[in-house]
Each structure stands twice: as structure tokens, then as C-alpha cells.
């Protein structure tokens, strides 16, 4: 049996993958075998023997030849598809869809002045030209090397879109919303080495009007002489911070929480749609026997994706991710890569302890008992398991994996084809869904070509630069 995710979510918060019908799902039940240890899982209603890229069938009336057979079409339509019109609401962030909050968040995203050296901003590790990821080296660097490669932010608001989340953030899921993720970065010693006090004071000094237009009156963070209410070097864990009056800490943290909510409102706008795959999906959904939106090689790659490549087990739904955590045997090797990284097992305690999580004081959720963090179970967390990233616009975001080990998509596919790295090079136990695939060279090339067809249209230029 495959290792299960460590979070337990009540039925009311189950992931909505917008699949078409229970009948269609029944036809595709075989896909579940990609997530357990049953032998020979095979594709969901797809014939691996047809993965050479040839046409599958032709119409009875002599019309256009169909590339995919009926079972393959049902699989594609049920388990994949275009993004919804808008991300699911984030009930923990009352300002998630406020355009003024998003504009303030965009300014903060590109502003390096609140970092320790005044030179590092969010965009340092989330470059618009790299799918809002980091292509500079195998690992991301701010003030120092961070120990992981930054995930891209495109379409991040879609995550695993359930009623109350979770949209787990970071490779280890240690934040449960985009705004909580944004708050972890300034105080990271390797990222910005700043403090919540400095960030709040920066908002007070530089963005007061913008802040108050969104969030209402900002607390007085300086006295009449201009002296800061709190020393900007103070942060939790320091005795000086702990000695502050509770009202001073609350004032700083309230402003800091709103910093995260503004940045998250901006990040929710980073949506790249209408990939060539999406156009093919719409053609198939309309009953067209085929689609010119993908080349034959890319279609053959899609066939591998839903069949012999076993990709659907983790990369499914409109955002091509199950939102879960898997140990796929990525070796802890490479320049500056730490010898150990526990992945999700290390992130769980941080998630639960985070005062900015969905159930915390600064969350806007109307029913905090429903927050997924309440159902996270520390015991049994997957050692060495990391979040399944979205594959949308994956061609823009090399290098790949949390270590940045793989420079190309072909490298990634070869890793899966071999069934992962050898034991002893990574932490924990390999997920049982990971087995050698024995793909041939044609299938490998086709799968890489299909993955590049998931790149969406460019964002409006106004979203990719400081306003």
C-alpha cells in the first residue's frame, strides 16, 4: 500500500478536481492503481501498447482520423482539463481578491528595501521570466543559499482547490496559504534575514496610504519624535521581543499579517492559461475526432502521460497536481545541497506551530475549526516526501526538484524511468508508486514534448514588473 498523506481532511473539504461525472470516474477507476502497490497498475482505460504515437482509430464515415481512442479521450477529459475561471476563494484571507490589496502586494513583491541588506526582494527567487521560479542555480539564494530550489508561483493559487484549502506551500507544506508562505520569507536567515518589525515599520513609513486604503488605520508604529514603537531588529525568539508589551507585539504582527495577505492577493493574479494542451482538451470535449493544437509527437507524449508513464497518479486535475507529498527518491546531492532534508516530516511541526496558519489569530476564516491544519497528524509524516508541483508552464521553471538536481525535463523523465535514485542517496522510503517504467527513447522524447505543451500564455506585462 502506498504511503498516505499525513493530513486528514473531513469530507466537506475534499479536493474538487472538477471531474465530469461519477460514471466517467467509474470507467477510470484503474487510475487508482498508480497510487498503490498492486502489481501492474497500467494506465486508466488506456492501452500502453499504443504509445508509439500512431493514430488510434478512424471514424466510421471516412472522416478525419482520431489520434486517441475512446478510452483515452475519456481519461483525458475526466482527469485533466483547463483551469477554472478563478482560483477557489481563500477564506483565511479576506483581502485575497481585493484589487487594491493586489496592487500593494505587487509593490511589496518587487521592493527589496525591507530585506536585511536592502537588495533582496521576492522577485530575487521568483523571476517572472522563469515562471516566477529561480533559474540562477540549482538552489535559490537570497542573503545566503537557501537549501532548496524555489517553486514557481504561476497558478499557485489553484493548488489542490478544496473548500477550506489546503493549498500547501513550500516543498514541505509548512505553510497552508499563500499569505502564510509570504510571511515565512522575510524572517528566513537565508532568504531576507529581516524581521516582522522591520517589515511593519516599512509599511508604516513607505506605504501608509496604500495600506490604509485596504486594511484601515495602521497602528502608530512611531511616536511623536519619530522613534519606532519597536526596534526593527526585534523578532520572535529574541528576549527583547518577548519582553515587549503584548499590545506592541500585536500591533506589529497585525501589520505583518496584512503584508502577507497583500502579497498573496498579487500572487493570485499570476495565472497562465490557454496552453496548447488546453486547446486540445476543449477540442476533444467538443467531440472533435482530433485537434491540431498539439503535434503528433506531443499527442504521443500525452498518451505516455496517461498510460505507460504513470504520471496521472500524482499529476492530475486542472493544475496537474494532487497537492500531496511523495518520496520520489531525489538524491540529496549537488552544489550546496544539504546532506539531509526530511521534507514533509520536517514541515509538519512548523505548520502546526505557525501562528499565521489558517486556524491562527490572524486568519480571517469564519470557522477555524474547519481549517485543514487541524487535521494534520504529526505521527507518520513522510520522511523525504515533497509536494507534487504543478506541471503547468513547467518548461519555464528549470532546474527541477527541490534540490535543482535536474537541468532539463528529459533529466526528470529519466529519473522516473529508472524508478528513482538508489537507496542511501535520499532520506526515508521510496513511495511504492515509483517503479521503473522501461520507456523507450521515442516515448521519452514524446513525453518531454508534451510537458512543454503545458506552457500557458504569457502574463500581461503589467503583472511582471514593479507597478
Image (cartoon, rainbow, N blue to C red):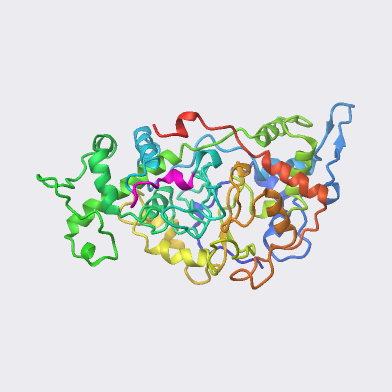
Side of 184 relative to 315 (left or right): left
Image location (x, y in percent) of residue 318: 60, 42
**Residue 335, quarter of the rendered image:** bottom right
Q: Quadrant of the C terminus?
A: top left
Q: Which residue is drawn at 20% across and 40% down?
A: 217
The main secondary structure of the magenta stretch is loop
- The residue located at (80%, 58%) in the rendering is 438
Residue 46 visible (yes or no): no
| Percent position of residue 95, x then y | 35, 40
Q: Left of 434 or right of it: where is 319?
A: left
Q: Which image quadrant: the N terminus?
A: bottom right
Query: In this picture, is 267 found above or below 349?
Result: above
Q: Is residue 3 left or right of residue 258?
A: right
Foreground residue among 157 and 461? 461
Residue 148 colored in magenta in the image: no
Q: Which residue lies furthest to the left in this view?
A: 224
| For residue 354, above or below residue 100 | below
Residue 118 among magenta residues: yes
* Horizontal and vertical percent position of residue 207: 27, 38
Q: Which of these two is toward me, 198 or 42?
A: 198
> How many marks overall?
0
- Toward the viewer: 362 or 260? 260
Residue 412 point in image, percent of width and height? 68, 54
* Residue 239 visible in the snapshot: yes
Question: In the figure, 278 relative to 233: above or below?
Answer: above
Which residue corresponds to the image point at 39% horizontal and 55% vertical from the top-left? 184
Q: What stretch is highlighted in magenta?
A: 115-126
Amino acid at each position: 500500500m502506498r504511503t498516505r498523506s499525513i493530513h486528514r481532511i473531513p469530507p466537506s473539504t475534499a479536493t474538487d478536481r472538477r471531474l465530469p461525472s461519477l460514471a466517467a470516474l467509474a470507467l477510470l477507476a484503474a487510475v487508482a492503481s498508480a497510487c498503490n502497490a498492486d502489481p501492474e497498475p497500467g494506465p486508466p482505460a488506456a492501452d500502453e501498447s499504443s504509445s508509439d504515437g500512431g493514430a488510434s482509430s478512424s471514424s466510421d464515415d471516412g472522416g478525419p482520423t482520431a489520434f486517441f481512442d475512446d478510452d483515452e479521450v475519456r481519461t483525458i477529459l475526466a482527469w485533466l482539463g483547463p483551469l477554472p475561471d478563478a482560483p477557489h476563494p481563500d477564506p483565511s484571507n479576506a483581502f485575497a481578491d481585493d484589487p487594491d490589496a493586489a496592487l500593494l502586494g505587487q509593490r511589496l513583491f518587487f521592493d527589496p528595501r525591507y530585506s536585511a541588506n536592502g537588495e533582496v526582494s521576492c522577485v530575487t527567487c521568483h523571476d517572472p521570466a522563469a515562471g516566477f521560479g529561480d533559474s540562477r542555480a540549482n538552489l535559490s539564494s537570497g542573503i545566503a543559499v537557501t537549501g532548496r530550489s524555489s517553486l514557481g508561483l504561476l497558478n499557485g493559487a489553484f493548488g489542490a482547490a478544496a473548500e477550506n484549502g489546503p493549498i500547501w506551500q513550500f516543498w514541505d507544506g509548512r505553510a497552508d496559504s499563500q499569505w502564510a508562505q509570504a510571511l515565512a520569507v522575510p524572517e528566513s536567515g537565508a532568504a531576507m534575514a529581516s524581521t516582522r518589525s522591520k517589515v511593519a515599520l516599512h509599511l508604516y513609513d513607505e506605504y501608509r496610504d496604500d495600506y490604509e486604503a485596504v486594511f484601515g488605520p495602521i497602528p502608530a508604529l512611531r511616536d511623536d519624535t519619530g522613534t519606532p514603537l519597536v526596534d526593527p531588529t526585534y523578532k520572535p525568539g529574541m528576549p527583547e521581543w518577548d519582553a515587549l508589551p503584548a499590545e506592541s507585539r500585536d500591533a506589529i504582527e497585525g501589520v505583518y499579517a496584512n503584508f502577507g495577505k497583500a502579497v498573496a492577493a498579487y500572487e493570485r493574479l499570476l495565472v497562465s492559461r490557454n496552453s496548447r494542451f488546453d486547446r486540445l482538451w476543449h477540442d476533444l470535449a467538443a467531440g472533435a475526432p482530433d485537434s491540431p493544437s498539439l503535434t503528433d509527437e506531443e499527442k504521443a507524449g500525452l498518451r505516455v502521460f496517461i498510460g505507460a508513464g504513470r504520471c496521472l497518479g500524482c499529476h492530475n486535475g486542472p493544475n496537474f497536481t494532487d497537492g500531496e507529498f511523495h518520496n520520489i527518491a531525489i538524491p540529496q546531492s549537488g552544489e550546496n545541497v544539504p546532506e539531509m532534508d526530511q521534507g514533509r516530516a520536517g514541515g509538519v511541526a512548523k505548520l502546526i506551530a505557525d501562528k499565521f496558519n489558517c486556524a491562527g489569530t490572524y486568519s480571517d476564516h469564519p470557522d477555524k475549526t474547519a481549517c485543514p491544519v487541524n487535521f494534520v497528524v504529526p505521527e507518520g509524516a513522510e520522511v523525504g516526501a515533497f509536494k507534487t508541483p504543478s506541471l503547468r508552464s513547467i518548461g519555464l521553471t528549470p532546474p527541477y526538484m527541490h534540490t535543482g538536481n535536474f537541468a532539463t525535463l528529459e533529466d526528470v523523465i529519466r529519473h522516473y524511468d529508472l524508478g528513482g535514485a538508489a537507496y542511501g542517496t535520499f532520506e526515508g522510503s521510496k513511495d511504492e508508486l515509483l517503479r521503473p517504467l522501461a520507456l523507450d527513447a521515442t516515448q521519452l522524447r514524446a513525453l518531454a514534448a508534451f510537458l512543454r505543451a503545458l506552457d500557458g500564455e504569457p502574463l500581461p506585462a503589467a503583472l511582471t514588473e514593479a507597478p
